Image (cartoon, rainbow, N blue to C red):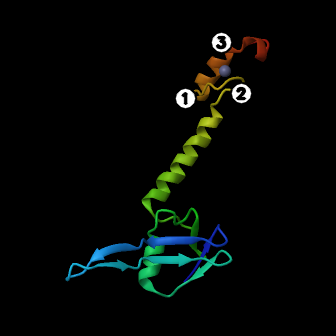
């Protein structure tokens, strides 16, 4: 399966390196798992690796499988919902000051009262 990242040489740490103590009490380094993108691409057929990439919190945001247009993780859905929410906020943001109304109606009342001079005659 091929993955595309928005970063050219993306080093994606799926499982970090860690130190473990073996049964003799010796400290050994257990290598983690890293996907190294090259020219925005990374290809693997290892099912464990594919699973790790697809369940990563940045999947669908920084990188995704070729041909996959569906964001999968819950975190991704939350992030996208937040982005939509902030886009909605700008719709009710006052053009004259940093005030942010909760509704279009609230914004109109705010402008009518706070910026009479700027909107001219009010119906
Ligand atoms: Zn205002």
What number is the disc on residue 29?
A: none
Mark 2 crowdedness (10 Å alpha carbons): few <14, some 14-19, many ≥20: few
Query: What distance separates the C-alpha of mark 2 from that of mark 3?
Result: 14 Å
Query: What distance separates the C-alpha of mark 1 from that of mark 2?
Result: 14 Å
Query: What distance separates the C-alpha of mark 1 from that of mark 3?
Result: 16 Å
The foreground one among 114 and 14 is 14
> Looking at the image, is mark 1 or mark 2 earlier in the sequence?
2
Residue at disc 2, CB closer than 8 Å to ligand 1:
yes
Residue for badge 2: 95
- Residue 18, compared with residue 98, is above or below; it is below
- Residue 77, compared with residue 31, is above or below; it is above
At x 24% / y 81%, what residue is drawn?
22
> Looking at the image, is mark 2 or mark 3 earlier in the sequence?
2
Residue 39: where, in percent of width, then height? 68, 77
Residue at disc 1, CB closer than 8 Å to ligand 1:
no
Residue 94 lies in quadrant: top right
Residue at disc 3, CB closer than 8 Å to ligand 1:
no
Residue 52: where, in percent of width, then height? 43, 74
Residue for badge 3: 113
Secondary element at image label 1:
loop
At x 20% / y 82%, what residue is drawn?
23
Residue 47: where, in percent of width, then height? 43, 84
What number is the disc on residue 102?
A: 1
The foreground one among 25 and 98 is 25
């Amino acid at each position: 399966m091929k993955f595309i990242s928005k970063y050219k040489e993306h080093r994606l740490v799926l499982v970090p390196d860690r130190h473990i103590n073996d049964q003799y009490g010796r400290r050994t380094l257990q290598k983690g798992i890293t996907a190294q993108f090259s020219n925005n691409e990374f290809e693997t057929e290892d099912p464990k690796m594919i699973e790790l990439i697809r369940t990563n919190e940045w999947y669908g945001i920084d990188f995704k499988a070729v041909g996959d247009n569906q964001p999968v993780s819950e975190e991704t859905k939350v992030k996208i919902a937040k982005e939509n929410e902030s886009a909605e906020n700008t719709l009710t943001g006052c053009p004259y000051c940093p005030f942010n109304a909760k509704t279009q109606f609230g914004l109109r009342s705010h402008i009518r009262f706070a910026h009479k001079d700027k909107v001219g005659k009010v119906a």
